[in-house]
Image (tube, rainbow, N blue to C red):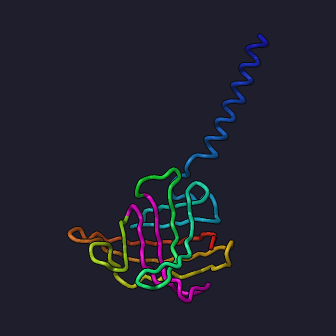
Amino acid sequence: MKKNAILRISLIISVGLCCFVFYSCNKKTPGTVLSPDEYINYTVNGIAYNFTMPMDSVMVNDSLETISFIPYNEVIGNRIPNVANDFARIAYTQTGIAQGSFQQLNIFYTLQTGAYINNISGYLTAVNQVMIKITEYGAVGQFIAGNFTATFTGPPPGNTPYIVICDFRVKRKM
């Protein structure tokens, strides 16, 4: 009898621990922001997607490299664990960046849209020039945040239209 009681208590503790680990490590429901600190939220034709720390990897790269010889920054979101081609990449000009500035979008990629690379043929094209409004720009260790709305057209022959609304907030590492 005592042995059965000890086994039941051990089982209850084990189940409780497993539930805690499962819910602590489980992926979020799509469209739900679990952490208000670091994220990339976007909608494509009205359907919401996101990358949110700590369930996903979200980072900013203040790059010294250049796209067309213009210094740029990029915000990248990846799934944890990694899912092939399911990432977001937002690259934009770095020159004159500050809170309240508008930075030109150079690269945008998501699994749902494919790639926009500054209107290079064979990729998405932007209907109008896309500018990201920088809403927060702190020092290293603080946050950069921004948003944009864009209409892209997919490559021929489909020419699929994509209406994208995006906002992000990521802690600067460099």
Q: What is the span of residues highlighted in magenta in the rendered image?
A: 86-112
Name which residue lies at 32% across and 73% down: 124
Q: Is residue 111 magenta?
A: yes
Name which residue lies at 35% across and 79% down: 126
- Give the image quarter of residue 12: top right
Q: Nearer the viewer, residue 18 or 33?
A: 18
Give the vertical position of 174 relative to 80 (above or below).
below
Name which residue lies at 37% across and 66% down: 113
Give the vertical position of 129 relative to 86 (above or below).
below
Give the vertical position of 13 relative to 65 (above or below).
above
Q: Nearer the viewer, residue 36 or 85?
A: 85
Name which residue lies at 61% across and 41% down: 22
Q: How many marks?
A: 0
Give the vertical position of 46 relative to 138 (above or below).
above
Relative to residue 12, is residue 68 drawn left or right? left
Q: Is residue 40 magenta?
A: no
Q: Residue furthest left?
A: 157
